[in-house]
Image (cartoon, grey):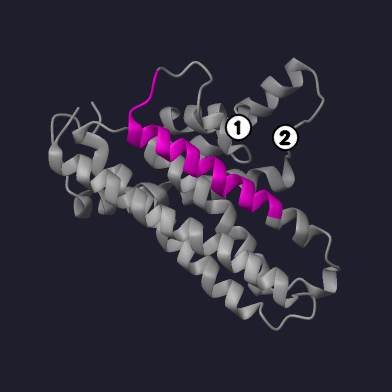
């Protein structure tokens, strides 16, 4: 039974739960990447070699205290390319969506497109010009669609809607951080006035759309529709 089943959690309770879950996920990923530093995934290897690698990973993580359930989830995520493809979180066969869910999918696609466009531009810049502010700006934009996806997967029923709202709020905070990072790039040698204003407008409009999304979800929570 999931911890929220049969209960209506408010945003505060959901935020505490999701923070604890993210801390646990961060620790699991840290252990995973520690393992792969000396035993990387065998790309292009035979199925027997891949199975042997998974067995070694499983033993390593079990020795670190991780449950079989946590390890199985990590391996599924590895196979589904969760680490790099936000679109894989949404199935192609999904039934007709609620208005709030459809809005979320549209918003996520918009955020993904903006993140990809900015990343392509940043990749063309000389390495000597890639400051921490630029890295933070790109990373923040890439994080937004994943945070929206996490909320979407929690769902729109009243039992889980509080968690969805928390994820949408986090995406909104991330957009604000992206704007702060962009402000630091205004005087960068590669940043023209035209490009800066275009980027600012795109991120600002995305931030406002995220704020409206949070309001939509809160309105649905208050109405209590299922």
Location of residue 204 with respect to 214 vertically, above or below:
below
Q: Quadrant of residue 110?
A: top right
Magenta highlight range: 96-117
Image location of residue 133, percent across then percent down: 64, 73
Determine the residue located farthest toward the bottom in the rendered image: 187
Residue drawn at point x = 70 percent, y = 84 percent: 187
Q: Quadrant of the N terminus?
A: top left
- The majority secondary structure of the magenta stretch comes to helix
Cα separation, mark 1 vs mark 2, equals: 10 Å
Q: Earlier in the sequence, mark 1 or mark 2?
A: 2
Image-quadrant location for residue 99: top left
Q: Nearer the viewer, mark 1 or mark 2?
A: 1
Looking at the image, residue 188 sits to the left or right of residue 197; the answer is right
Q: Residues within 10 Å of mark 1 (few under 14, many from 20)?
A: few
User: Which quadrant of the figure contains the C terminus?
Assistant: top left
Q: Which mark is residue 41?
A: 2
Residue 197 image point, x, y percent = 63, 71
**Which residue carries the number 1 mark?**
78
Q: Is residue 142 toward the left or the right of residue 100 in the image?
A: right
């Amino acid at each position: 039974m999931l911890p929220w089943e049969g209960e209506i959690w408010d945003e505060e309770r959901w935020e505490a739960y999701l923070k604890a879950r993210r801390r646990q996920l961060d620790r699991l990923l840290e252990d995973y990447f520690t393992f792969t530093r000396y035993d990387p995934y065998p790309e292009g290897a035979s199925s027997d070699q891949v199975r042997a690698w998974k067995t070694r990973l499983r033993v390593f993580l079990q020795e670190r205290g991780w449950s079989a359930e946590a390890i199985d989830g990590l391996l599924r995520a590895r196979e589904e390319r969760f680490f790099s493809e936000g679109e894989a979180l949404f199935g192609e066969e999904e039934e007709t969506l609620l208005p709030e869910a459809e809005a979320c999918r549209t918003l996520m696609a918009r955020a993904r497109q903006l993140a990809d466009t900015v990343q392509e531009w940043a990749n063309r810049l000389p390495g000597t010009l890639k400051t921490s502010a630029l890295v933070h700006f790109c990373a923040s934009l890439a994080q937004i669609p994943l945070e929206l996806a996490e909320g979407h997967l929690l769902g729109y029923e009243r039992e889980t809607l509080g968690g969805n709202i928390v994820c949408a709020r986090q995406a909104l905070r991330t957009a604000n951080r992206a704007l702060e990072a962009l402000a630091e790039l205004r005087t960068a040698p590669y940043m023209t006035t035209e490009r800066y204003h275009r980027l600012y407008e795109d991120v600002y409009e995305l931030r406002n759309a995220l704020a409206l999304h949070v309001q939509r979800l809160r309105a649905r929570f208050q109405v209590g529709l299922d």
